[in-house]
Each structure stands twice: as C-alpha cells, then as structure tokens.
Image (cartoon, rainbow, N blue to C red):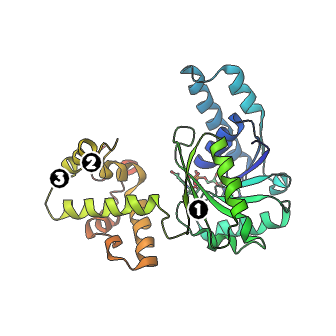
Amino acid sequence: MAGRLGVVGAGLMGAGIAQVAAQAGWDVTVRDLDEGSLTRGRDAIRGSLDRFVAKGAISAQDAEAAMDRIRTSTELEALADADIVVEAVFEKLDVKLEVFRALDKICKDTAVLATNTSAIPVTQIAVATGRPEAVVGTHFFSPVPMMKLCELVRGYKTSDETLATAKAFAEGVGKTTITVNRDVAGFVTTRLISALVVEAVKLVESGVVSPEDLDVACKLGFGHPMGPLATTDLTGVDVLLHATRNIYDDTADEKFFPPELLQRMVAAGDLGRKTGRGFYRY
Ligand SMILES: NC(=O)c1ccc[n+]([C@@H]2O[C@H](COP(=O)([O-])OP(=O)(O)OC[C@H]3O[C@@H](n4cnc5c(N)ncnc54)[C@H](O)[C@@H]3O)[C@@H](O)[C@H]2O)c1
C-alpha cells in the first residue's frame, strides 16, 4: 500500500513520519506554518537518511529517492489530494481542532484523517470535522525511523474501514501496531508508563529505594532497556506530570494521582535532561 500522504507539522514527529512513509514509497507533502520550520524538517530527514546510509542500512540511491518523494508547503491546500493525512502539530487541543476543521474542508471525501496525539482523546479532535468516522489516532513513537510501535486509537465514531486503512498504512511503513479499542485518557502506552513512574516515584519519595536502584531493578529484573526514572528524565519530568495529571483528571483513579515529589521537582525546575537535573544530574 502506498499513495499520497499529507503530514501537518514538520517537527520531530512530522518529519519522522514523512521520512518512513517516503522510504516506503508514499508521495508525501508536509505542511508547516513557515519556511523555516519546513527547512528544519527537511534537514532532519536528510540527516536521518544520511545516518542510515552511513550505517549501510539503506543505499544512497534509496535515500535520494525518499527525499525526492517529499514536498513541502506552507499551504494546507497542498494536502487536498492526500489519501491519508497525519496531523503532528503541537499537543494543544485548540491547535488540533483548527487543523482538523480546515482539513475537513479541503480533503477529499475518502481521505483518512489521522492524529499523532499522545494523549488527547481522538473523539475530542474528531468533532471538529463533519466526518468523525474517518478520524483515527496513529500514535508513532520517537524517533519514528527507529521505534517500531504505532499505537492505533479508535475514537468513539471511528469506522472499521478507517482503522483498517490506518493499520495498513502504519504496517506498510514498517511499524508493528497495537489497537486501542476506546480512546481512554493516555491510551495504553501512556497509561502503562504513568502507572509505573507514579509507583516508582512513590517508592523513591518514601525512602524505600534510591532512583539508581529502582532503575536497576527494572533493567535487570524486567529486561527494560532503560529504567522508568531515567526515561522520565529523558522525556521531561513536566511532561510525565502533565500526562499523569490528565489521566487522573479523567479517571479519578488514585493510582494516577501525581506524587508530591513529582510536583515539587517540576515547581523547582528540575525537569530532567533538558534542565541538567531531574532524578539524575547531567
Ligand atoms: N515528541 C515526542 O516524543 C512525541 C511522541 C509521540 C507523539 N507525539 C505527539 O506528536 C505531536 C507533534 O509533536 P512533536 O514533538 O513533533 O512537536 P514539535 O514541536 O517538534 O513540532 C510541531 C510542529 O507543528 C507545527 N505547527 C503548529 N501548528 C501548525 C499548524 N496549524 N499547521 C502546520 N504546522 C503547525 C510547528 O511549527 C512545529 O514545527 C504532538 O501531538 C505530540 O504530543 C510526540
């Protein structure tokens, strides 16, 4: 399966999705708000393809062919003939609603409209369109060219056909999919990591174990490539706090109530690697 793909947003995720699709033979058009963002997106794709070539994972000709299949535009209308559009703009509901409202107007009737949101319920995004049955979540992971998972999320009105198209697309670009049958807060992956991190933080804050030993337990005991606290430092302590708070707000399930330590770390500005300090110092 290959055809015409539209990508909205040329950031970290949009560029990655455009890249894997172009490598799989899709004609890709990426839209961002300004030329600077589009140039950064193209440069990121070029850099990633060059690294694959340097490792001998793909040929220089294939990398060139993939680049040639990617067009960029600041006009959303450039996506009008796309078979599938994947939205990867900022994780803000109002921004996504505006994008989907506009996509609904310009995309062809048969197009599938996908969102790469990590946590916003697909149903909430789909209401911006007159075709909620055609809206689906395709939650890719970062870095997209390396990470094998795509979490497919069914909104309240997503049709079987839309889900099947999204699955064929994600598998066609080399991903293994899981299907989330209801768009609960945090879907499946954010629920799991939030539950693990919340419990990990509780164990650390109550003095049961050090952050180092907790991460060692998960690595050597469960075979995780990285411990949950080191992962949180990488993702951003604030990002994790925001995720668990959202899940708690939606479910009132106390296991997702953000522990005090997590809240204080964010208040103090210890957000992980990006600020030089989180559960570890960098
Ligand atoms: N970063 C991650 O690890 C990750 C992982 C999974 C999912 N996600 C989700 O993917 C989405 C994108 O995240 P990201 O990390 O790529 O963000 P990013 O900030 O790197 O990129 C977002 C891009 O969207 C552009 N943009 C904003 N409004 C736009 C509009 N109306 N039209 C076109 N472009 C617009 C911005 O200019 C920017 O280039 C978010 O919903 C995020 O939650 C991110």
User: In this rendering, does residue 33 appear at all?
Assistant: no
Of the image marks 1 and 3, the number of the one nearer the N terminus: 1
Mark 2 or mark 3, which is nearer to you?
2
Of the image marks 1 and 2, the number of the one nearer the N terminus: 1
Cα separation between marks 2 and 3: 13 Å
Nearest to the observer: residue 68 or residue 129: 129
Of the image marks 2 and 3, the number of the one nearer the N terminus: 3
Mark 1 belongs to which amino acid? Val
Left or right of 63 in this view: 146: left
- Packing grade of label 2 (10 A; few <14, some 14-19, many >=20) is some
Disc 1 element: strand
Q: Quadrant of the N terminus?
A: top right
- Packing grade of label 1 (10 A; few <14, some 14-19, many >=20) is many
Identify the disc placed on residue 210.
3
Residue beneath the point at 70% across and 25% down: 62
Nearest to the observer: residue 263 or residue 102: 102
Left or right of 22 in this view: 228: left
- Do tag 1 and tag 3 residues touch (Cβ < 8 Å)? no
Q: Which residue is mark 2?
A: 218
Q: Quadrant of ligand 1?
A: bottom right
Residue beneath the point at 57% across and 26% down: 52
Number of callouts in the render?
3
Cα separation between marks 1 and 2: 28 Å
Mark 3 belongs to which amino acid? Ser
Q: Quadrant of the C terminus?
A: top left
Disc 2 element: helix
Residue sitting farthest toward the left: 207
Identify the disc placed on residue 190.
none
Q: Which residue is mark 1?
A: 153
